[in-house]
């Protein structure tokens, strides 16, 4: 039985899980949840995930939510070679730092831009939020100094989580190639990954959705 993923195509965290699943060759049963119709607040979904967030994974009754937790679960269970989440202590520590940067800094700031737009409370990106994102780009640029990927010379969960968030932010606060050449190169390298469709398809929907809400 394929694991079930409760998801929304445009969601960056969902896309990171789709990337991980594709990288590992895992087929998922996708169950779309429309948060704008409060489908995440139904009694049925609350029984699965009382925090009512997506993505949520149901792997034959094993329930995991939060994309970072889901991705670690998937690689721990299915990636026998530990290529995406190596055991080597320092490498794993760097990966974990990048994951926490995504969950604690990057994505929360993104949400502060995305949700007011999605709820039609505004049609612009507030300058102070754009400044926070640009500051975060500066950190990412530093992470990539001397490295092809976010945690070294190999693709890891750090890249899979961050690429979904960063490419979404690029829609809202475009990445300046002159100031952030390492990020631009990293995005291009990510687009060449054989499983990048896990991000690409939902990103197109996200871009169309956001551009329809932003002031021309």
Image (spheres, grey):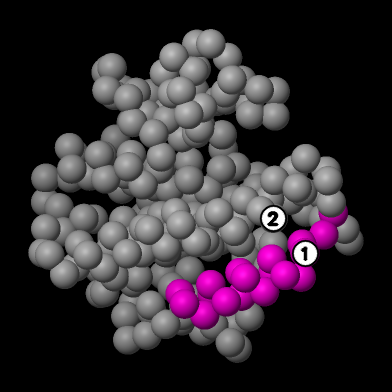
Q: Classify mark 1: helix, strand or loop.
A: loop
The stretch in magenta equals 123-140
Question: Would residue 29 be found to the left or right of residue 153 on screen?
Answer: right
Instruction: Give the overall secondary structure of the magenta segment.
Output: helix
Q: Is residue 29 visible?
A: no
Q: Earlier in the sequence, mark 1 or mark 2?
A: 2
Looking at the picture, tell me which residue is in the foreground, 144 or 127: 127
24, above or below 85, in the image: above
Q: Residues within 10 Å of mark 1 (few under 14, many from 20)?
A: few
Looking at the picture, tell me which residue is in the foreground, 166 or 89: 89
Looking at the picture, tell me which residue is in the foreground, 123 or 27: 123
Question: Would residue 138 be found to the left or right of residue 17 on screen?
Answer: right
On-image quarter of the C terminus:
bottom right
Seen at 20% across and 62% down, the residue is 92
Contact between marks 1 and 2 (CB within 8 A): the answer is yes
The numbered disc on residue 126 is 1
75, above or below 132, in the image: above
Seen at 51% across and 27% down, the residue is 52
Find residue 119 and report its image quarter.
Answer: top right
Q: Residue lying at the far top in this picture: please name it.
A: 43
Seen at 72% across and 70% down, the residue is 128
Reading the image, the residue beneath label 2 is 113
The numbered disc on residue 52 is none
């Amino acid at each position: 039985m394929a694991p079930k993923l409760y998801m929304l195509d445009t969601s960056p965290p969902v896309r990171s899980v789709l990337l991980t699943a594709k990288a590992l060759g895992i087929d998922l049963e996708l169950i779309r949840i429309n948060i704008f119709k409060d489908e995440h607040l139904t009694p049925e979904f609350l029984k699965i995930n009382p925090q009512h967030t997506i993505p949520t994974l149901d792997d034959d009754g094993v329930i995991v939510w939060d994309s970072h937790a889901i991705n670690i679960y998937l690689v721990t269970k299915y990636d026998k070679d530990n290529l995406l989440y190596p055991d080597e202590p320092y490498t794993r520590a760097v990966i974990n730092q990048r994951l926490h940067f995504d969950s604690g800094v990057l994505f929360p700031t993104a949400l502060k831009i995305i949700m007011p737009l999605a709820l039609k409370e505004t049609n612009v990106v507030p300058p102070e939020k754009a400044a926070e994102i640009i500051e975060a780009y500066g950190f990412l640029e530093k992470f990539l100094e001397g490295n092809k990927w976010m945690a070294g010379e190999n693709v890891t969960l750090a890249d899979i989580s961050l690429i979904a968030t960063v490419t979404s932010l690029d829609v809202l606060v475009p990445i300046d190639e002159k100031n952030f050449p390492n990020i631009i190169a990293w995005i291009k390298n990510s687009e060449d990954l054989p499983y990048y469709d896990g991000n690409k398809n939902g990103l197109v929907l996200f871009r169309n959705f956001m551009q329809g809400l932003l002031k021309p």
